[in-house]
Amino acid sequence: MQKVERPKTLKENALESLREAITSNLLKPGDRLVERTLCESMGVSRTIVRECIRHLESERLVVGVPNSGFVVASISNAEVKEIYEIRTLLECSAVKACSLKATPAVIKTLYALHDDIAQHLQNNDVKTGLKMTKDFYELIFKTAEKHVSWDLVEQLNSRISRLRALTLSSTGRKTSGPKDLFDIVKAMEEKDAEKAGEICTRHLQEAYDIAMQTEQGAA
């Protein structure tokens, strides 16, 4: 039986909209979150706006400033470094394990996701590209049976999406990033776990280098 998705609540839509504005860099580090402005722009009550801000504070996307309310949080050099270290450890382990467990159906789905990611990024639809990138990695982790690892990645996903959006603004990353994903799937198809892991490591190292060169990577 096909699962019927329930409509999203006003709060869920508002939270998604505000999170996307931050992760896509529409709202930049240090930007103040003005409740009245957010209420008007999203068409929701001040109570809902406050609940959304508190939720995003738990995701470390916003931070409270004494006598100034809440602002979009910065990501320090140390945090960027640690996030990429964690990603490299977890993602490369999942990629290697997935290489040994992936069925032809999984490989076919990963190729299809890659094609969609590449197309959306070339069309400058970063929002959809990021969502499908999350789907791509989720399939890898679930196929690898790295469920605890995926839970940890999920906790970082808001900040990971924010860093991905930053790196995609770099010249050529919208092409080189998807190419790396294709090469990872190709290595998986060949059951070459070590090669898949090496490509994943290189992919993340390049992303880290780009992130550290951006203003938002500055301490």
Image: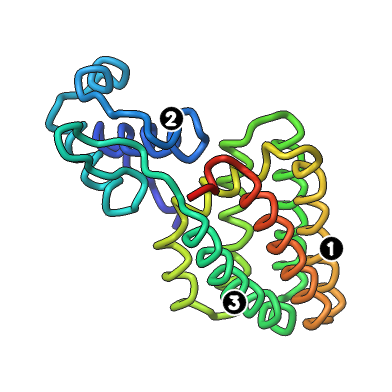
Q: Which residue is mark 1?
A: 183
Q: Which residue is mark 3?
A: 89
Q: Earlier in the sequence, mark 3 or mark 2?
A: 2
Q: Nearer the viewer, residue 153 or 65?
A: 65
CB atoms at circles 3 and 1 under 8 Å apart? Answer: no
Residue 165, horizontal then vertical, whole percent: 59, 42
Residue 34, horizontal then vertical, whole percent: 24, 24
Residue 207, horizontal then vertical, whole percent: 68, 55
Q: Secondary structure at mark 1?
A: helix
Residue 201 falls in which quadrant of the image?
Answer: bottom right
Q: Amino acid at mark 3?
A: Leu
> Gap between marks 2 and 1, in whole Å?
33 Å
Image point (55%, 80%), residue name: 145
Q: Amino acid at mark 1?
A: Asp
Q: Nearer the viewer, mark 2 or mark 1?
A: 2
Outermost residue on the front side: it is 219
Q: Nearer the viewer, mark 3 or mark 1?
A: 3
Residue 95 falls in which quadrant of the image?
Answer: bottom right
Q: Earlier in the sequence, mark 2 or mark 1?
A: 2
Image point (45%, 36%), residue name: 20
Question: Does residue 13 sit above or below 77 in this rendering?
Answer: above
Question: Does residue 58 sit above or below 95 in this rendering?
Answer: above
Image point (62%, 52%), residue name: 212
Q: Which residue is mark 2?
A: 27
Q: Secondary structure at mark 2?
A: loop
Q: Secondary structure at mark 3?
A: helix
- For residue 85, the mark is none
Q: Amino acid at mark 2?
A: Leu
